[in-house]
Amino acid sequence: MTEKKRIVSGMRPTGKLHLGHYFGVLANWKKLQSEYDSYFFIADWHALTTKFDATDTLCDNVLNVALDWLACGIDPEHSTIYVQSMVPQIAQLHIYLSMITPQNWVERDPTLKDMARALREGGHSEAQVSYGLLGYPVLMSADIMMFNAHYVPVGVDQIPHVELTRDIIRRFNNTYKTDFFIEPEPLLTQIPLMKGIDGNKMGKSFNNDIKISDDEETTTKKIMSAITDRSRLRRDDPGHPEDCEVVFDYWKIFSDEVKIEEIEGLCRMGQIGCAQCKRELAKRVNELLAPIREKRRQLCENPKVVREILLEGSQKAQKDAQIVLDKVKEVVRMY
Ligand code: TRP
């Protein structure tokens, strides 16, 4: 039997997740977890890099992310699911990496620059851009190297971080005359970009998202509020699916070829009104989410089980991480 390749990926605990997370990330992880030795973690230290002063909701957010993951089929039998701060070896590895990483490597990281700019433009003071935030990509390198990952499933915005990880690995291996660390590759997927209900990118802060945990009624209401083809005034006017950004896009994500063609045909011929089209879409979305929501509800009643899963996953991660850390200390020649 050949050994499976390892993947590591993480998500900052921002609270309840939405359908953009589901289609963009979780559906992919769910598939990957049977093909790879998978490590998925909740990046609570990374949350602190920008929100060190908003920790009152942090624990809740971690729990909610875990609930969403488990409900969506991220399976502790297949994946190691853990909380970053519960694996202290990562912080130690971060220290070693921070020593060998030239300052200008982190300063030129484009994603980090965007984060710092967003903070400043959000009216935050210069003090909000911390030393820890500067170390964001180095901490992320530690996340990835901690399990000597072969691949890192991420979105395009994270590619600079994976590139930096490769640079740090080359420098580490060179400096300490070792070939221990593997240079990981980003694992990009063809993910349909999920628009928010207003046509912009779906995001919690834009108030245009449908949460995985939303109930049927809320979901239906949100979908019914989407703007459709503006040139269509009467129900039997011919419609233009290509101009119906949100609703037609959702149909493409939520159903199969046959149904998409049917809806497209009915719309073009003016045989289905926008309200009815949205009602049918909402029904379809709710059907798809029903089992996920049911599972989430059950887990929600049993938060102890969820905490236990995170604890066990973190203990397993600690064990694997310690082996890597011992190796690092040996090649760096620590006392
Ligand atoms: N930076 C990632 C994000 O914002 C989260 C993350 C932290 C991550 N550490 C990671 C992703 C390690 C992949 C691997 O989405």
Image (cartoon, grey):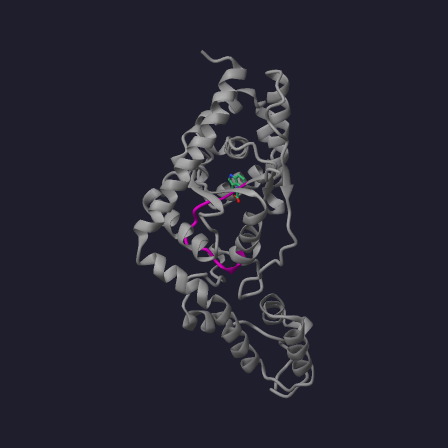
What is the residue that sits farthest to the front in this orientation?
Answer: 1
123 sits left or right of 6 in the view: left
Name the one closer to the observer, 44 or 326. 326
Task: Say how many tags the image has.
Answer: 0
**Residue at point 65%, 81% (across, down):** 267
The answer to whether any part of residue 47 appears in the image is no
Residue 285 placement (x, y as % from top left): 51, 70
Q: Is residue 91 above or below residue 117?
A: above
Q: Residue at x 57, y 44 (%)?
A: 36
For residue 115, side relative to residue 271 (left or right): left
Image quarter (top left, top right, bottom left or bottom right) of the N terminus: top right
Inspect the magenta stretch and tell me whether residue 12 lies in it: yes
Residue 183 versus residue 179 in the image, above or below: below
- Determine if the magenta segment contains residue 284: no
The relative height of residue 229 versus residue 64 in the rendered view (above or below) is below
Specify the quadrant that holds the C terminus: top left
- In the image, residue 21 sits, relative to residue 49, either above or below, namely below
Q: Nearer the viewer, residue 92 or 50?
A: 92
- Decide if residue 313 is in sight here: yes
Q: Position of residue 248 (x, y in %)?
A: 62, 71
Where does residue 155 sit, x and y in percent of width and height?
60, 47
> Range of the magenta residues?
8-20
> Residue 114 at what x, y percent from top left?
57, 41
